[in-house]
Image (cartoon, helix red, strand yellow):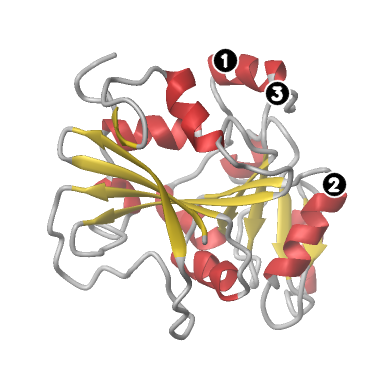
Amino acid sequence: MSGETGIDELWPGRADGLDDDALLGGYEHGVREEWVRVNFVSSIDGAATSAGRSGGLSDGADKRVFALLRRPCDVVLVGAGTVRVEGYGGMRVDAESERWRIEHGFAPQPTLALVSGGLELDPHGDVFAEAPVRPIVLTTAAAPAVRRRALAEVADVVVCGTGSVAPGEALRALARRGLKRVHCEGGPRLFGSFAAERAVDELCLTIGPVIEGGAGGRIVEGVPRLARSMRLARVLRSGDTLLLRYVRG
């Protein structure tokens, strides 16, 4: 395990380096059959992006956890804006992760579910064309019909609300398809909508060792003050980077 991606557990547990099984095992503690996990990275001063992308704040340790957290889920949930900004292609876990998933009772590849009110998605884009599993698009009744028809050729388009995608309806739609373990990769507005409805069970937050400044947004946007309490469940460290796990209080 290289120094760049070596991760120590500070609390609770041992203060020594973790292999992938030990690292992932700590994230699975207390997880139930139906679970919504959210994963984000932030700077010390609370910025969710650097130069407009969250990837600009990520280091080797964060990328390692980011990839591992795709293993124990049925579906990866992500907002359409994040797909465009972060450059998502066909989402596929690697061969080792695929073996792990099969051994632990998951489908070989997780399903990708995109959330989009306006359906400003390219049906010919790699996120659909290279997907190993037919994606799901969660949208609203107000979405343009012509875009719904175009996307229905490459994805399952599901209406989950009127003016905006309703988190509760979205989770029920996924559960009806057997997709109960939800791993959300953002963005901030999607996280905010789920937090507002108390639909988040866990937040995995990487704190990158940089003061970003500027006008970068926070990891929650688009909602009024929430004051939602969460309990610190795990603290990991890689160099000067902290990786925190919070669960619903």
Circle 3: residue type: Pro
Q: Is residue 177 visible?
A: yes
Say which residue appears at 39% left-offset and 17% top-offset.
19
The Cα atoms of the two marked residues, 2 and 3, are separated by 16 Å
Which residue is farthest front? 13
Front residue (pair 186, 206): 206
Rounded to the nearest angstrom, the CA distance separating label 2 from label 1 is 24 Å
Q: Nearer the viewer, residue 223 or 12?
A: 12
**Which residue in the protein does label 3 denote?**
108
* Residue contact at pointers 2 and 1, CB within 8 angstroms: no
The residue that mark 1 highlights is 95
Identify the disc placed on residue 220. none
Give the quadrant of residue 227: bottom left
Q: Residues within 10 Å of mark 2 (few under 14, many from 20)?
A: few
Q: Which residue is mark 2?
A: 177
Position of residue 160 measured from the top left corner of the image (x, y, whole percent) = 77, 69
Identify the amino acid type marked 1: Ala
Helix, strand or loop at mark 2: loop
Residue 184 on image: x %, y %: 56, 51
Quadrant housing the N terminus: top left
Q: Earlier in the sequence, mark 3 or mark 1?
A: 1
| Element under disc 1 | helix
Q: Please provide percent x and percent y for residue 82.
A: 47, 57
